[in-house]
Image (cartoon, helix red, strand yellow):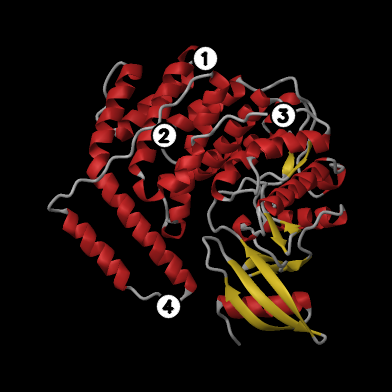
């Protein structure tokens, strides 16, 4: 009997679907997932197995929760993959593999892209009209009152953060206080929200499914529109975000409160920062994913730019430096050439190799510019603390203590410090600049 992970998964999929697995391949991505084909009663069923992230960064742990939500959305008439069941070792949701692509460049033209994006917005509005009671029955928390509704998603992440926190996190601690001081208290409507929206597939000019509901919760519908703003940068939605938010207002019959949208953008990004703060402060080998490093920086940047919208305080991006050509540059060239000679034996290995090349370039930039950036950061924090810390560890510890008792009168100074620190880190991350650029958010114009 095959006791490898693939062998165990194969047997469980066969038991759940009731057929014979004729193909089972690991999807080459940062989290575990598999494509399978199952032969059953003379037909071949395309199957997708969605595994877990293998990192303690989930505010709503347990894929069984997501499976229950998928079933409720299917019962509510939304186009989601049908769930057959769940595997236990490795854990995963066994669902139909729906045809289609998420890449909007594969649409026929701009008109088709816009139509697909508007169709998705219509589905989002339908989701927001679903009865919340069945979701509460499967364990989704029903927040009561404006504050609980506004902070529903963030509260879940704060519990995660408290459990996983390691070391000082002055930016996080300040941002949590800022968010709670600025909750919009005039909104008391709660609905089922996607949580991490903008994830859909299309084929032959039609939307085939919506997917990924591990962040689904009950909260303010503007949470989803805020999240779409940051999704659009890395996965274009098919139409301008301003157009889609205006389209949501039309199909839902509800005007969009732009200051509240800015608040929810900041809160959504802070939730992502909370999820990564602990694991990335002391990453283990299984956690050492390039994606997590990029997400950590992009979410911090987007959070601060959304706060800037709320505060009316602009952020000035830092121009990325050009690494000098020094004698030691040849070491970097040798490293790049060495990585280029590695022949990966699988799609997953090829993805790891691509990540290694990006990390090598990023590490070079950090080595060249990191010391000067660290010294400038210590100079800035000295103006807040009244004394210059010895190093960044000491600075973070002292600044977290300062934040714990700081009031709203210190928000401007702390915001300026954290924005400058983050923009320096963005400028240093040379090989991922294109991915970080969108997170210098443009204000929504309706």
- Which circle marks residue 142 in the picture? none
Image coordinates of residue 243 in percent, x first then y, are 68, 37
Tag 4's secondary structure? loop
Cα–Cα span, label 2 and label 3: 27 Å
Foreground label between 2 and 3: 3
Quarter of the figure that contains the N terminus = bottom right
For this rendering, which residue is in front, 335 or 316? 316
Q: Is residue 64 above or below residue 168?
A: below
The earlier-in-sequence mark between 2 and 3 is: 3
Q: Is residue 418 above or below residue 36?
A: above
The earlier-in-sequence mark between 1 and 3 is: 3
Measuring 29% from the left and 45% from the top, which residue is drawn there? 366
Q: Which residue has dot 3 on it?
A: 148
Image coordinates of residue 174 in percent, x first then y, are 49, 26
Measuring 15% from the left and 53% from the top, which residue is drawn there? 328
Q: Which residue has dot 2 on it?
A: 168
Cα–Cα span, label 1 and label 3: 21 Å
The earlier-in-sequence mark between 4 and 3 is: 3
Measuring 28% from the left and 34% from the top, which residue is drawn there? 374
Cα–Cα span, label 4 and label 1: 55 Å
For this rendering, which residue is in front, 294 or 151? 294
Foreground label between 4 and 2: 4
Tag 1's secondary structure? helix
Q: Which residue has dot 1 on it?
A: 408
Measuring 37% from the left and 56% from the top, which residue is drawn there? 358
Q: Which residue has dot 4 on it?
A: 345
Q: Residue furthest left?
A: 327
- Quadrant assignment, res 210: bottom right
């Amino acid at each position: 009997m095959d006791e490898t992970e693939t062998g165990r998964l194969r047997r469980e999929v066969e038991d759940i679907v009731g057929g014979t697995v004729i193909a089972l391949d690991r999807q080459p991505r940062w989290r575990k997932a598999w494509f399978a084909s199952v032969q059953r009663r003379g037909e071949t069923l395309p199957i997708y197995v969605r595994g877990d992230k293998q990192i303690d960064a989930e505010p709503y742990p347990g894929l069984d929760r997501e499976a229950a939500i998928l079933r409720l959305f299917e019962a509510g008439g939304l186009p989601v993959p049908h769930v057959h069941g769940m595997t236990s070792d490795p854990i995963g949701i066994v669902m139909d593999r729906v045809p289609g692509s998420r890449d909007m460049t594969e649409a026929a033209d701009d008109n088709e892209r816009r139509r697909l994006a508007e169709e998705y917005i219509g589905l989002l509005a339908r989701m927001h009209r679903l009865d919340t009671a069945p979701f509460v029955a499967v364990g989704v928390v029903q927040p009561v009152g404006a504050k609980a509704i506004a902070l529903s998603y963030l509260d879940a992440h704060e519990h995660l953060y408290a459990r996983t926190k390691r070391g000082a996190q002055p930016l996080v601690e300040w941002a949590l206080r800022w968010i709670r001081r600025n909750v919009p208290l005039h909104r008391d409507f709660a609905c089922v929200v996607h949580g991490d929206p903008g994830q859909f597939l299309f084929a032959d000019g039609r939307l085939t499914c919506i997917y990924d509901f591990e962040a689904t919760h009950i909260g303010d519908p503007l949470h989803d529109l805020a999240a779409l703003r940051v999704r659009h940068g890395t996965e274009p939605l098919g139409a301008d975000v301003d157009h889609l938010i205006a389209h949501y207002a039309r199909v839902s019959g509800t005007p969009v409160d732009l200051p509240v949208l800015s608040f929810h953008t900041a809160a959504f990004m802070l939730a992502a920062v909370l999820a990564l703060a602990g694991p990335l402060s002391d990453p283990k080998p299984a956690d050492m994913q390039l994606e997590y490093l990029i997400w950590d920086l992009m979410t911090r940047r987007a959070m601060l730019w959304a706060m800037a919208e709320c505060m009316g305080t602009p952020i000035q991006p830092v121009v990325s430096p050009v690494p000098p050509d020094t004698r030691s540059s040849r070491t970097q060239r040798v490293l790049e050439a060495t990585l280029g000679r590695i022949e990966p034996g699988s799609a997953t290995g090829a993805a790891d190799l691509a990540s290694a090349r990006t990390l090598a370039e990023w590490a070079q930039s950090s080595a060249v510019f990191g010391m000067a950036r660290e010294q400038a950061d210590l100079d800035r924090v000295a103006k807040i603390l009244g004394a210059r810390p010895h190093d960044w560890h000491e600075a973070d510890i002292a600044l977290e203590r300062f934040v714990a008792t700081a009031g709203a009168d210190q928000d401007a100074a702390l915001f300026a410090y954290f924005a400058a620190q983050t923009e320096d880190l963005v400028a240093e991350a040379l090989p991922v600049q294109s991915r970080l650029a969108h997170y210098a958010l443009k204000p929504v114009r309706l």
